[in-house]
Image (tube, rainbow, N blue to C red):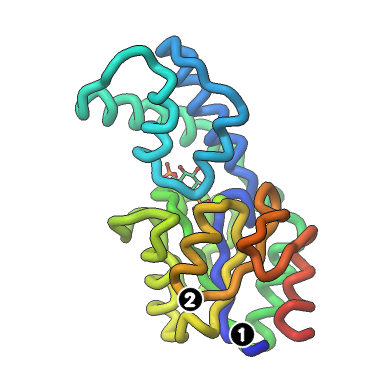
């Protein structure tokens, strides 16, 4: 298999900020009296902040104006940013630094493809920023996963044809996006059993066998 670049999803792959997203949405939902069950959490993976809010508001008994929605999303993001303050380099997923180093040493380009507008702050807190040749995130795109835009942007920044890219994802929305981008897929975490994935990684290091056989 010829792979020239790896595009990593961030949240749920390189760091478990997915738990912080859940906690922050839960806090906001509780304050608003909206039922928010843990099972709804998987529908928030990979999708944008405003689309996540729409999922949560499905359970509310009332309609919210756009101004109110913006305020709710902003409030949740404030709670999320408070939680992000706990992040340290030790919170990077096990094996992630080693995998990034192995790719770079072997001439495989590495990028981030994340829906999160908080990507820059998360990478800084993890001390990973300098390890990526390109970062494509929620600040630069119009359509979030399952749209392929963020992954196509990452490939463009790397100047690598999408067919030579593999995406590592924890979300169905991200796997759909990667397939739409014409890329190979490796699923991990909650998406590990996905039929959309070309490869299934129980540990991130297993990607080396996918790339080099
Ligand atoms: P923010 P990823 C995604 O990150 C999260 O999985 C998703 O739950 C979140 O709603 C989205 O980022 C937007 O995050 O509110 O920080 O802009 O998995 O694409 O790295
Ligand atoms: Mg993710």
Q: Where is residue 199 drawn, in percent x and y? A: 71, 68
> Which numbered disc covers residue 49?
none
For image coordinates 58% across by 39% down, the residue present is 42
Closer mark to the observer between disc 2 and disc 1: 2
Q: Is residue 129 left or right of residue 57?
A: right
Q: Is residue 198 left or right of residue 47?
A: right
Residue position for label 2: 182
Residue 120, can we see it? Answer: no
The answer to which of marks 2 and 1 sits earlier in the sequence is 1
Residue position for label 1: 3
Mark 2 near mark 1, Cβ–Cβ under 8 Å?
A: no
The quadrant of the image that shows the N terminus is: bottom right
98 or 113, which is in the foreground?
A: 113
- Vertically, is 208 above or below 88? below
For image coordinates 56% across by 80% down, the residue present is 5
For image coordinates 50% across by 53% down, the residue present is 173
Residue 94, quarter of picture: bottom right
Residue 137, can we see it? Answer: yes
For image coordinates 59% across by 42% down, the residue present is 17
The quadrant of the image that shows the C terminus is: bottom right
- Vertically, is 103 above or below 85? below
- The Cα atoms of the two marked residues, 2 and 1, are separated by 13 Å
Q: Count neighbours of disc 2 (C-alpha within 10 A) and say few if under 14, some if 14 to 19, many if 20 or more.
A: some
- Vertically, is 73 above or below 142? above
């Amino acid at each position: 298999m010829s792979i020239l670049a790896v595009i990593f999803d961030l949240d749920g792959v390189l760091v478990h900020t997915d738990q912080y997203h859940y906690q922050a949405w839960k806090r906001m939902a509780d304050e608003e009296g909206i039922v928010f069950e843990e099972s709804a959490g998987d529908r928030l993976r990979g999708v944008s902040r405003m689309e996540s809010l729409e999922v949560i508001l499905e359970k509310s008994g009332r309609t919210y104006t756009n101004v109110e929605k913006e305020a709710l999303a902003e409030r949740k993001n404030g709670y999320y940013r408070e939680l992000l303050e706990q992040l340290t380099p030790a919170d990077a997923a096990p094996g992630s630094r080693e995998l990034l180093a192995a790719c770079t040493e072997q001439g495989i380009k590495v990028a981030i493809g994340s829906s999160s507008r908080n990507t820059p702050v998360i990478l800084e807190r993890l001390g990973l920023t300098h390890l990526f040749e390109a970062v494509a995130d929620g600040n630069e795109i119009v359509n979030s996963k399952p749209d392929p835009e963020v992954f196509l942007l990452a490939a463009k920044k790397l100047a690598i044809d999408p067919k030579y890219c593999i995406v590592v994802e924890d979300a169905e929305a991200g796997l759909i996006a990667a397939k739409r981008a014409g890329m190979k897929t490796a699923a991990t975490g909650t998406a590990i059993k996905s039929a959309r994935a070309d490869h299934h990684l129980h540990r991130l290091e297993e990607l080396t066998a996918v790339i080099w056989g």
